[in-house]
Amino acid sequence: MALTLIKDQPKSLIKDAKSQSNGRFYVGLKWDERSTDGSPWDLDGHAFILNKARKVLGNTPQEKAHNWIFWGNKQDPTGGVLYSGDNRTGAAAGDDEWLKLDWNLLPADANEVMIAANMYFKPEEQQAFKAKGQELPTFGSVSNTMFHLSDLVDDTPGLSLTEPFFLGEDVSDFRCAIFVSVYRNPANPSDLKVKVINAGYAEGIDALASAHDIDLEAAAKELGLITSNN
Ligand SMILES: [Ca+2]
C-alpha cells in the first residue's frame, strides 16, 4: 500500500514503502492549470544533489552547476538524476514535470537529492505586477500542487510508493519551497529514505541554493544560459 507521507517524518522507501526497483525512483510534480485570467502558472522543479554536509556536490562552480538539475540542465553527469523538461502551464494530462532518480548511478558521496520548486514569472510579468503596486502571486494561488513517488521500472513509473502529497497551507505564502528529499539512511547505506520538508523559502531559489553552497548565477554562467536563473 502506498505510504501516506507526513511532513518531517522520514520513511524508508525499501522497508516502509516496499520498493522493488533497486534504487530507481520516479518523482512526479503536478499542479492545476490556472482557471482565472492572466499568465499560466509556471512552476519549475529543481533537484540539488547534496553530500552529507548538505552541500551541492562538487569542488568548483563548474562541478556544482552540473549537480543542479532543472530546465537549464536536464541531467547530472552520471545520469542519476533526470528532469522531464519545463512545463509552463500545469496542463499536462499526467504529471506536469518529473524527476527520475537512479541511486546506482549517483556517486558515493551523493547522500541526498533535494527537490524544490519555484514559481517562475517572466521579467515583463514581474514588471507588470510592480507597476500596479502588487506582489507576485504565491503557491497559495495555485490549486492542487502535489508530488508523489513511484518505483521506476524499465524507465517507466511502476509501483506507487507514496500517496500524492498536497503542499497546502505550509507553503501558500511562498513562491519557492523545498518539497521533499530522498537520501541514504545514515544507519544503513543500502536503504533510502524519503522525507517531506514542505518549507517555503521567502528569499527565493537563489538564497535556497546559496544555503546549500551553490551560487546559481555562477552556475547558470557555467551552463551557458543567457538569463542568470529563475
Ligand atoms: Ca515549469
Image (tube, rainbow, N blue to C red):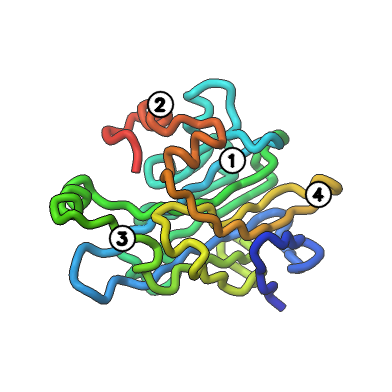
Q: Quadrant of ligand 1?
A: bottom left
Query: Which label sits in the foreground, 3 or 4?
Result: 3
Residue placed under numbered mark 3 in the picture: 137
Rounded to the nearest angstrom, the CA distance separating label 2 from label 1 is 17 Å
Q: Amino acid at mark 2?
A: Ala
Q: Residue at x 42, y 61 (%)?
A: 173
Q: Considering only order in the chain, which callout, 2 or 4, is on the residue closer to the N terminus?
A: 4
Residue placed under numbered mark 1 in the picture: 49
Rounded to the nearest angstrom, the CA distance separating label 3 from label 2 is 27 Å
State left or right for residue 64 relative to residue 8.
Answer: left
**Quarter of the image where the N terminus is located:** bottom right
**What label does residue 218 carry, if any?**
2
Q: Are marks 3 and 2 in contact (CB under 8 Å)?
A: no
Task: Locate residue 176, reporting x and y percent.
Answer: 43, 52
Q: Amino acid at mark 3?
A: Pro
Q: Are marks 4 and 2 in contact (CB under 8 Å)?
A: no
